[in-house]
Amino acid sequence: IGKLPQVHAIWCAGSATGVSIMSIWTEMISMGIQFAYNVVRSTPLTTYAEVPILFGQMILLAVVAAWVDGYLTVRIWIILLLVVVLTLCMAIGLIPTTVTLGFYALNALLGFLIVGPQVLMNWRTRSTGQLSLAVTSMTFGGLSSRLFTTLVEVDDAALRVTMLLNWLLTLTLLLQFWAYSPSGATVSQTVCQEELTPAVVPARTTLSKLSLHAQGSASSLMGAASKIGSHRCLTDLVGEEGINRFEKVQ
């Protein structure tokens, strides 16, 4: 499954809000470097079998994020093509192994660039936005298994340190889902409602006064109408003859 739930979430939302674009691209490049490094070093397949799959899914995620946010241009396609070509060239040895090893040495820095911007964005907004908890959890689980197999099956200090660093960074990102859970949003909404209450009360008081005034006006109008109606009823009872006599007496 990998990154597919994240792709689905962004596609359904029609926006990549809350997801760091820099994190997407740096993780995609990092996956390419990890794949090429493991192939060149002939490490056991059990330690990196999911890397090429995730590499393809990161490309798909970058395309979908660019599509929904309206910047999927020819330049984006060219950059994606270059990333794929360079990854394959490192894996099959067209690029010198020393260059691949150098890129992998920088992969630890890419770990900070992958998770760092996303962690910072979540901290500033106090929200994880469209970031998928399912994807982050599965990524953490995959990294945990890879860390275990790497420590057991691979005698490569650089690979071990990189895997441990990526595991710690992903753990930090996963803890932010707990720190910025929906319960925090509920508390914020309650505080906002409490702050707005004093402004609502005078408004209700004003509406009550207006209602009473309208009722008073209606009562006055009804009273006038009843008086007119009563006068009309008396004239009907007395008749025209009685009225003429009253006028003559005056």
Image (spheres, rainbow, N blue to C red):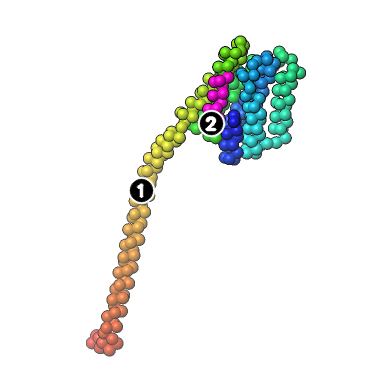
Q: Residue at (38%, 45%) from the top-left corner?
A: 199
Q: Amino acid at mark 1?
A: Pro
For the residue carrying disc 2, how many other residues have a C-alpha within 10 Å: few (<14), some (14-19), or many (20+)? some
**Quarter of the view holding residue 85:** top right
Helix, strand or loop at mark 2: helix
Residue 140 location (% of width, % of height): 54, 24
Residue 142 lies in the magenta-colored region: yes
Q: Is residue 185 left or right of residue 18?
A: left
Q: Which mark is residue 134?
A: 2
Look at mark 1 in the image and give the residue it sits on: 202
Residue 84 location (% of width, % of height): 71, 26
Whether residue 150 can be seen here: yes
* Above-or-below relation of 154 to 177: above
What's drawn in magenta, residue-wise?
134-146
| Mark toward the start of the polypeptide (1 vs 2) | 2
The residue mark sitting in front, 1 or 2, is 2
Q: Is residue 223 left or right of residue 151?
A: left
Could you tell me what secondary structure mostly forms the magenta stretch?
helix
**In the depicted view, which residue is nearer to us: 117 or 50?**
50
Whether residue 62 can be seen here: no
* Above-or-below relation of 165 to 249: above
